[in-house]
Image: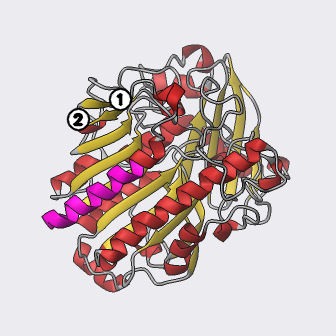
């Protein structure tokens, strides 16, 4: 099947190295190739010039933990293990869960990660090195990842201790993450073993207020120090500059080691940009909303892929893809067995610039599993339905937007298309599998979603 599909597309099943670089809270409009005018991102833009840029790519969720869980499990927001940032559990992933890294490891890949994991703390079964990764360096706990000058970084089963770093600012975590990523690439290449690198960077996420009164910590505001901007804006731009520079370092190493033709590099963000970003940057471009919203500004993200010789250069694709698609896609390219009952589909044809070969009906997201309010969203064809609130069993109305003609979701057309609203409501009512980890009873009680779940 892999041979036949790949040959039809012009892509040979060469078991590529896979480098998946994910920024944290980078907005759809923060990159030059997506319309940013003030912050320069030449290295990321170069990936787009040499590969394909997707305009309709979606994160797994509107905040970091569920988005990462969707990426790792291939299950959408209503099915995956971790569905919200709170409460924080000692572990989200269990031994019985199957991750992207485990699937690739079964096909002989060496799997390494740097950055923010969020799916299991140290010494828990959810830690990265118990979920398919040969090595992990950075932050296992998502709150720990809010510090750019931490007292330690998780290092496989131990720690790299950095005593006094919060005061001395001696070691900037992002620099350490990149050095370890480059080392992993070199070691894997020297071993002549196919590899998967998951670079889950924390830039340009806001830091803990305990670390920086402005909410952003960065060693220097260069090259924007002389701009007539507020300090917070300079810091944000400098963080994106550092991120872009290190994407360039990774790409340069791949090219220098003559691995380009055998390495798929993907760059994306875990969710939409933050509402506190300076207005001058227009972080989410034409999209409405921000991180934590289920409007497009919260879940639509930049996604760029480069694989010279396989992905044609300078392509733009409007195909609708999502984080849950990465597991089956990478499994197909690696020749690995795809787990059953995934929500994701292979998007190999879309990577090659062609149409998706799938009859997937819809995409689903939700947010607020551990809160008194619960939100849902469905994309069906070009329709986007958003139920903004279910509070104590009372469901709010579903808003409906035609994304083909209303990308900014400014015009609610639910009254004009009741049959579409009804169909989307049916999807919302059946898309969620109950989880004992989330106290959903008071939110759902008396509502069709809750009734459907309790009858299963």
Q: Is residue 346 above or below residue 220?
A: below
The Cα–Cα distance between marks 1 and 2, rounded to whole angstroms, is: 9 Å
The foreground one among 262 and 6 is 262
Image quarter in which the N terminus is found: bottom left
Colour scheme of the rendered structure? secondary structure
Residue 340 visible in the current orientation:
no
Query: Is residue 152 shown left or right of residue 297?
Result: left
C-beta proximity under 8 Å, tags 1 and 2: yes
- Residue 80: where, in percent of width, then height? 42, 37
Query: Is residue 403 shown left or right of residue 267?
Result: right
Look at mark 1 in the image and give the residue it sits on: 120
Look at mark 2 in the image and give the residue it sits on: 130
- Residue range in magenta is 177-193
Badge 1: how crowded within 10 Å, few (<14), some, or many (20+)? Answer: many
Q: Earlier in the sequence, mark 1 or mark 2?
A: 1
- Residue 317: where, in percent of width, then height? 57, 74
Instruction: Please tell me whether residue 179 belongs to the stretch shown in magenta.
Output: yes
Residue 414 visible in the current orientation:
yes
Give the secondary structure at mark 1.
Answer: loop
The foreground one among 78 and 102 is 102
Instruction: Please tell me whether residue 75 belongs to the stretch shown in magenta.
Output: no
């Amino acid at each position: 099947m892999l041979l036949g599909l790949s040959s039809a597309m012009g892509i040979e099943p060469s078991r590529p190295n896979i480098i998946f670089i994910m920024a944290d809270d980078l907005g759809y409009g923060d990159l030059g190739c997506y319309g940013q005018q003030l912050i320069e991102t030449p290295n990321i833009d170069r990936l787009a010039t040499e590969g394909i840029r997707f305009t309709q790519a979606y994160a797994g969720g509107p905040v970091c933990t569920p988005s990462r869980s969707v990426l790792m499990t291939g299950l959408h927001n209503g099915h995956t293990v971790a569905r919200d940032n709170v409460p924080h559990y000692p572990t989200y992933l269990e031994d019985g869960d199957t991750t992207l890294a485990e699937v690739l490891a079964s096909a002989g890949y060496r799997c390494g990660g740097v950055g923010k994991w969020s799916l299991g703390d140290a010494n828990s079964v959810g830690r990265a090195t118990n979920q398919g990764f040969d090595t992990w360096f950075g932050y296992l706990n998502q709150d720990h990842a809010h510090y750019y000058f931490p007292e330690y970084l998780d290092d496989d089963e131990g720690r790299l201790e950095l005593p006094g770093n919060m005061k001395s600012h001696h070691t900037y975590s992002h620099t350490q993450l990149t050095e370890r990523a480059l080392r992993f690439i070199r070691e894997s290449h020297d071993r002549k073993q196919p590899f998967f690198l998951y670079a889950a960077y924390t830039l340009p996420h806001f830091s803990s207020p305990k670390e920086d009164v402005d909410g952003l910590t960065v060693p220097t505001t260069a090259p924007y120090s002389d701009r007539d901007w507020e300090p917070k804006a300079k810091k944000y731009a400098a963080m994106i500059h550092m991120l872009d520079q290190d994407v360039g370092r990774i790409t340069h190493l791949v090219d220098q080691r003559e691995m380009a033709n055998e390495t798929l590099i993907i760059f994306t963000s875990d969710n939409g940009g933050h509402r506190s970003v300076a207005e001058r940057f227009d972080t989410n471009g034409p999209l409405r909303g921000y991180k934590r919203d289920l409007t497009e500004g919260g879940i639509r993200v930049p996604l760029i892929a480069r694989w010279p010789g396989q992905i044609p250069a300078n392509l733009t694709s409007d195909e609708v893809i999502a984080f849950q698609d990465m597991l089956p896609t990478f499994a197909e390219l690696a020749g690995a067995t795809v787990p059953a009952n995934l929500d994701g589909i292979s998007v190999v044809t879309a990577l090659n610039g062609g149409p998706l070969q799938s009859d997937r009906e819809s995409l689903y997201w939700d947010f607020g599993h551990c809160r008194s309010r619960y939100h849902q969203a469905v994309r069906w064809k070009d329709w986007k339905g958003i139920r903004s609130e279910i509070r104590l069993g009372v469901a709010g109305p579903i808003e409906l937007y035609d994304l083909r003609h209303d990308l900014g979701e400014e015009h609610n057309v639910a009254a004009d298309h009741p049959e579409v609203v009804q169909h989307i409501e049916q999807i919302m009512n059946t898309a969620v599998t109950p989880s004992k980890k989330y106290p959903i009873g008071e939110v759902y009680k008396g509502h069709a979603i809750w009734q459907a779940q309790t009858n299963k």
